[in-house]
Image (spheres, rainbow, N blue to C red):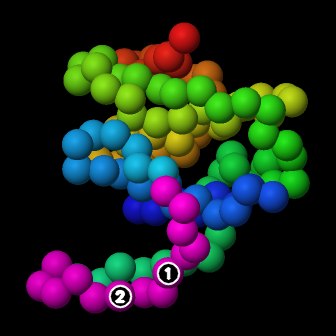
Amino acid sequence: MHVWLSVEGQGTYRLHTSGDGSLDVSAGVPHEDYHMEPHGEVAVEPGTPLPLGERVGQRIEGVSWLRQDPPGTEVGVVLHFAVGAVAVANLGDDLVVAAWPADAWSAAGVAEVV
């Protein structure tokens, strides 16, 4: 799964899982649906995953990295807002978008890099 994050004045970034377990963050705009023969079709659906949808229009105050143990690699980012934070991470090749902090992150061995 990919998530595109548009940041006013900075552009649009694609966040998606990478084969090495990390989160790939790169500049890029949403693309159209496409076929991955013989593996099926990729569908691009409009919408904003919660809790990011609750933050539309808010200023990102800071960004920090997330690490998972094991495998001990950087797997995602935390977007810090004036009130609250949202994490986006590659957990077992699934893109997870959820409030930060939360017990589910700790249970998965995910911690903020300090």
**Amino acid on which disc 1 is placed:** His
- Image quarter in which the C terminus is found: top right
Question: Can you say whether 81 is above or below 6 in the image?
Answer: above
Where is residue 35? Give x, y as percent: 28, 88
Residues packed near mark 1 inside 10 Å, few (<14), some (14 to 19) or many (20 plus): few
Where is residue 26? Give x, y as percent: 49, 56
- Image quarter in which the N terminus is found: bottom left
Q: Main secondary structure of the magenta part?
A: loop
| Residue 44 badge | none
Where is residue 8? Give x, y as percent: 81, 58
Q: Helix, strand, or loop for circle 2? A: strand
Where is residue 24? Give x, y as percent: 41, 49
Mark 1–mark 2 CB contact (< 8 Å): yes
From the viewer's side, name the closer residue of 28 and 19. 28
Q: Residue at x 86, y 46 (%)?
A: 58
Can I make out residue 108 in this image? no
Which segment is the magenta one? 26-39
Q: Helix, strand, or loop for circle 1? A: loop
Question: Can you say whether 103 is above or below 17 in the image?
Answer: above
Q: Which residue is mark 2?
A: 34
Q: Residue at x 47, y 45 (%)?
A: 96
**Amino acid on which disc 2 is placed:** Tyr
Q: Which residue is mark 1?
A: 31
Q: Is residue 27 magenta?
A: yes
Whole-angstrom CA distance, mark 1 to mark 2, is: 9 Å
Q: Is residue 19 magenta?
A: no
